[in-house]
Amino acid sequence: MTHLNRRGFALSALALTTLSACGNGIGGNGAATIDARVDTTLNFMYNTYPGTRDLASKASGMLVMPVVTEAGFGLGGSYGRGALRIGDTTVDYYSAAAGSAGLQIGAQQFSSVLFFMTQEALVDFRRANGWAAGADIEYALNDTGETLRAETTTSLSPVIAVVFAQAGFRAGATIEGTKYTRIIP
């Protein structure tokens, strides 16, 4: 007869929780889940910020990250999975990961879409073996609560980032320093 003590029970519960949270999609419907979340995210963005439809129509491609989770207490990090769309077709799946250190506390979730405004920017992204978002990204900001717009100068940038739907208790959301890596869901 096996006797479980509190430590054994706690370790078993932790292991089961960790394994169930991994959800790597092997043998599952990972791609279908990501695609459904991308569709929902795009519908929300277009309905909430109608100006993004214009960006989408001009973009060579879009990387949609439906949910990025970011947390930190001294050390921090973020992670999310999404899809690269060219037109209405998903062509690849990506993960987004970042780490940080410094004075920080809190957690949040947000959605982001990278609009590749030139064919060259899209090709560079797809050819890279892990692409890092840097200072060359322009942000289209939600300046009035209801409308999100990109100025004429911003829309001439090769990559435009739209970050929206923040929820949580951490100040600000940025994708600078985030590394995007192609995955097989």
Image: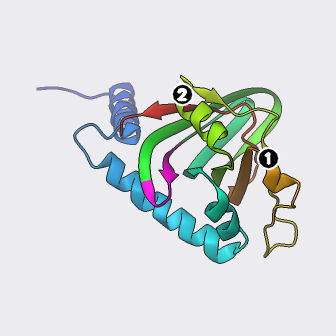
Q: What number is the disc on residue 157?
A: 1
Q: Please determine whether, in this image, residue 147 is positioned above or below residue 71.
A: below
Q: Nearer the viewer, residue 46 or 73?
A: 46
Q: Amino acid at mark 2?
A: Arg
Horizontal relation, residue 81 to residue 102: left or right: left
Mark 1 Cα within 10 Å, few/some/many (few <14, many 20+)? some
Instruction: Estimate the spatial distance between the alpha carbons at disc 1 and disc 2, rounded to whole Å.
Output: 19 Å
Image position, residue 51 (x, y; %): 73, 71
| Residue at the extreme front of the image, as rendered | 119
Horizontal relation, residue 93 to residue 112: left or right: left
Mark 2 Cα within 10 Å, few/some/many (few <14, many 20+)? few
Image position, residue 50 (x, y; %): 69, 75
Residue 90 among magenta residues: no
Horizontal relation, residue 19 to residue 105: left or right: left
Ranked by sequence position, the earlier of labels 1 and 2 is 2
Q: Quadrant of residue 135?
A: top right
* Residue found 74% across the figure and 28% down from its top: 100
| Contact flag, marks 1 and 2 (Cβ < 8 Å) | no
Quarter of the N terminus within the rendering:
top left
Prevailing secondary structure of the magenta residues? strand
Q: Nearer the viewer, residue 119 or 48?
A: 119
Is residue 163 visible in the rendered structure shown here? Answer: yes
* Residue found 78% across the figure and 68% down from its top: 148
Q: Please determine whether, in this image, residue 108 is positioned above or below residue 128.
A: below
Q: Which residue is mark 2?
A: 127
Q: Please determine whether, in this image, residue 100 is positioned above or below residue 60.
A: above
Q: Which residues are magenta?
A: 81-89
Q: What number is the disc on residue 112?
A: none
Q: Quadrant of residue 59?
A: bottom right
